[in-house]
Amino acid sequence: MTVAAFASLQGFFGFVPNLFRAQIPLPQVLDAEATIVGALLAKERFLSRKQKLLILLAVAAAYRNAYWVTANRRMLLSLGVPEHQVEHIIIDSCQADLSKADGALIRFAIKLAQNAPSISGRDIAVLRAYGFGDSVILEVIAVTALSNFFCTLSVGLGPKLDFDPYVIPLRSNRPPLDEQPYIWGVSGPYLRSVKLSPDNFAPFAFFAKRFGFIPNIFHAQTLSPEVIEAEAELIRKVLEPEDVLSHLQKEYVLLVASAANLNTYCVAVHCEMLRAMRVSNEESDQIAIDHRLADLSEPNKALLDFVRKLAVHPSGLEGSYVDNLIRHGFSEKQLIEVVAVTALGNFFNILQMGLGTTPDVEPKRIFVGKGVFLPYGAERRADFSQQNDPDAGFVTRVQNGDTEAFGELVVRHSRRVYRTLVAIIGNVEEAQDAMQDTFLKAFEHIGDLRQHSKFSTWLLSIAGNTAIQRLRDRKRLDYLDEDGDDPESYPRQARAWEPNPEQSYSQAERRSLVETGLMKLPSKYRVVLVLRDIEQLSTEEAATALGLGIPALKARLLRGRLMLREALSPHFSMSVQKLGV
């Protein structure tokens, strides 16, 4: 009942946040959320109330989520935590007045919240080195996942602030640093567990009935059975009902959210659930990769547009996505439920990546970066001894734990990556940020580099996908994967150039003219010219890096060259020069 739910929420927060009041139209969802707040936050088993609030604040600040930064800041101040300590958590947790152990917990939570796919056994080993046991680490992972859940809800529902607005200061760009040596190749599951049976543990009986098996993500949490019980209640009350959204729509939502979060484990589980609903493997695979190309109704595509955006943007969401759902006939209850299902998907995504559980169902693909998908079963350790790849030795050293060798790879390829990013994004400052993202993703996933892949081509594919995602995020993409002929891409006129145009300008002037003309081209042609004519990649390498077929790449190369020639014609054509222009 809502009254009992409000009492439980009041017990932890000291008030009933407007976020939960906004969900009154779906009381069963509200009840389930109150249950997990009571099980995970209200009871002090391993972490204190203050430690939990510090984690909630740090994660909300990392997401720049104004609603939860404001609420958690107020709660910490009411506990008597000094204001300067709270401000340091918001601005830069590395400078906060915390013990080394608590600082390590906060840094781990921020890393898990911001870049969950990068979590490894190394991060767990760092926490153990500070003396934390598996029960404490499990609770930190669960609280971090719940913070993401709360932030996703607040962004999707847009509740009124509970207190006077607090302006979030700019955070330090310093990445969370570990004080322990790097521990390479420690794979999951990361935490110990105890054996529980469906015969004597009701949630496991429920999971076995719903999923047909007990997912490893729940086996990995048996040190906290009360939390598992609360998670079962969330699934029962958020996913089981079919009076608002259908079961099929909810599985679509969970699949797209998992793919957006690069969670191979959860994608595999939800593809299996869809298979049980008679959705083909090919169709579920397409929904995970790009739902816009799947055989779905326009309302469901609009629904999943909203989900994909919400799943990866816990700081804000444009109103146009909600407006689009309303235009497609979605009701208030449906909007609330899709936000709750997306938030639940995010919760389990963060939880699974923090626990490092192995797949229950063999996935078709592994997700190694935004838009980068590899067939499952690809070799994690490539044998480069048979390849003609000048980077092979450095790659092997990095894969064997020599992190300094990666610095050499950065030096070798930074200019090429930078030029490629500028060619796609068209903005120097943003390209610099994207270059850091590209090398970070490459370092995190270099163990996934396949045996017959060339490092430089693989790196450029990551750069391309990173740049494309940035363009999609700012809704300025002239679709790089679009292969149809564009009549506007062909020159309207072809002028004869001077016999030797090089004599008309100095080398520096010619280079400036070419760069200016190149940057005016649409992205899909600009990047092909950069890779083929400037970086001198072969046709096959450029096609692989961009995920194109060779005929499509050749067609774009021809069009791009013609368009660039037309752009430069006013400077080099005979007709223009004869007129004295």
Image (cartoon, rainbow, N blue to C red):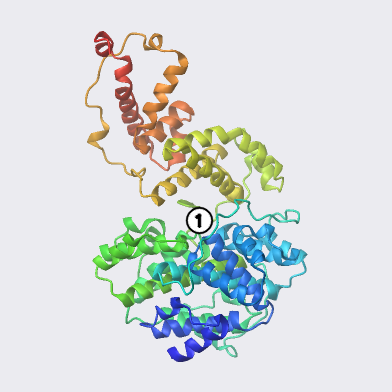
Residue 561: image quadrant is: top left
Name the amino acid, label 1: Phe
Q: In which quadrant will I find the C terminus?
A: top left
Foreground of the two, 409 or 198: 409
Foreground of the two, 296 or 100: 100
Residue 451: image quadrant is: top right
Residue 479: image quadrant is: top left
- Residue 457 locus on image (x, y percent): 52, 38
In the displayed structure, 229 sits above or below 116; it is: below
Q: Is residue 373 left or right of residue 574?
A: right
The residue at 49%/33% (across/down) is: 419
- Residue 516 locus on image (x, y percent): 39, 27
Q: Is residue 188 visible from the viewing direction of this image?
A: no
Q: Is residue 263 visible from the viewing direction of this image?
A: yes
The residue at 55%/57% (across/down) is: 169
The residue at 42%/63% (across/down) is: 310
Q: Where does label 1 land, which residue?
A: 367
In the displayed structure, 16 sits above or below 119; it is: below
Secondary structure type for disc 1: strand
- Residue 3 locus on image (x, y percent): 45, 91
In the displayed structure, 451 sits above or below 167; it is: above
The residue at 47%/75% (across/down) is: 162
Q: In which quadrant will I find the N terminus?
A: bottom left
Foreground of the two, 145 or 62: 62
Label 1: how many Cα within 10 Å (few below 14, some 14–19, many 20+): many
Q: How many marks?
A: 1
- Residue 472 locus on image (x, y percent): 39, 50
